[in-house]
Amino acid sequence: MGMDDALEDRPFVIINVAQSLNGYIAGKGGKPVKISSDEDEERVHALRASVDGILVGINTILRDNPDLTARGKDGKILRPARIILDSRLRIPRNAKVLDSGSRTIIFTANSQRTVEGAEVRVMAKDDLEIPCILHNLYRMGIRKILVEGGANVIWRFLRAGTVDRFYLFIGNEPIPEGGIKLFAGKPEPEEAIKDTKVINGGKLLELDPLKLVTDNEQ
Ligand SMILES: NC(=O)c1ccc[n+]([C@@H]2O[C@H](COP(=O)([O-])OP(=O)(O)OC[C@H]3O[C@@H](n4cnc5c(N)ncnc54)[C@H](OP(=O)(O)O)[C@@H]3O)[C@@H](O)[C@H]2O)c1
């Protein structure tokens, strides 16, 4: 590896996630719930419009089937690359991210299947670590990404120490107990709060990603 190709070269990483007042990012069994207000959705679309790629884990595709597009200020649809982490290549053929509307990149360890509408990057299982995936993205020309979830993928990024900005929207409404929590079994992130802003329907926290991970987790 030459000087120009250090493993530390990686895209800038922003995490954005929304949780209910009582800490849930999804309902029971991973059922999607609407947490963001219209104003918050506008903020998320501006964030999406500012990056080269939007990254999610396969469970988010299976539960929510998002198209991961961005709406520009003038209502124009923007199309950053869509990046999916899917070690077993479980993505269904009819997933919206396979609509060929924009570039879709899947990182997997399964070489047994082809997927129409996506660039499938087959890696050795041990290479499916976040730093390695980020380095690959960098080499593909991707310089800035937005990680939207779910909880599993977000904690992998935090533990890898590869998060530059972390936004957590907390909605004003609770949802029924029993869903997926980002901070399940962990303290709420009071110590990590860098900034708080009230926006319509809730509040937006900016968190210090390094303070979210305790020493024994890293
Ligand atoms: N409120 C929000 O802002 C928000 C945003 C997004 C999602 N969500 C919710 O979050 C829920 C899903 O969260 P989740 O924690 O269950 O799952 P997830 O993070 O969406 O996906 C996790 C899965 O991704 C795969 N994966 C993770 N790291 C990988 C890697 N380095 N390489 C290859 N594959 C990798 C693994 O699949 P395998 O097990 O097959 O290896 C893992 O089980 C959904 O219910 C969704 O509604 C909420």
Image (cartoon, helix red, strand yellow):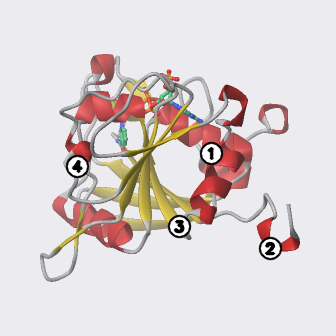
Amino acid type assigned to the residue bearing label 4 in the image: Asp
Q: Amino acid at mark 2?
A: Asp
The residue singled out by tag 1 in the image is 157
| Residue 111 percent location from the top left of the image | 51, 26
What residue would you read off at disc 2?
Answer: 4
Q: CA distance from mark 1 to mark 3?
A: 17 Å
Cβ of mark 3 under 8 A from ligand 1: no
What crowding class fits label 1: few (fewer than 14 Cα within 10 Å), some (14-19), or many (20 or more)?
A: some
Most extreme residue toward the left, as rendered?
75
Quarter where residue 80 is shown: bottom left
Q: Label 3 sits on what residue type? A: Ile
Q: Who is closer to the viewer here, 43 or 88?
A: 88
Residue at the spot x=14%, y=76% of the render? 76
Which residue is label 4 attached to? 67
Per the model, the C-alpha gap separating discs 3 and 2 is: 16 Å
Upstream in sequence: badge 1 or badge 2: 2
Q: Which quarter of the rendering shows the C terminus? A: top right
- Residues under numbered marks 4 and 1 in contact, where contact means CB atoms less than 8 Å apart: no
- Could you give the CA–CA distance between mark 2 and mark 4, rounded to whole angstroms? 34 Å
Camera-side residue of 159 and 175:
159
Which quarter holds ligand 1? top left
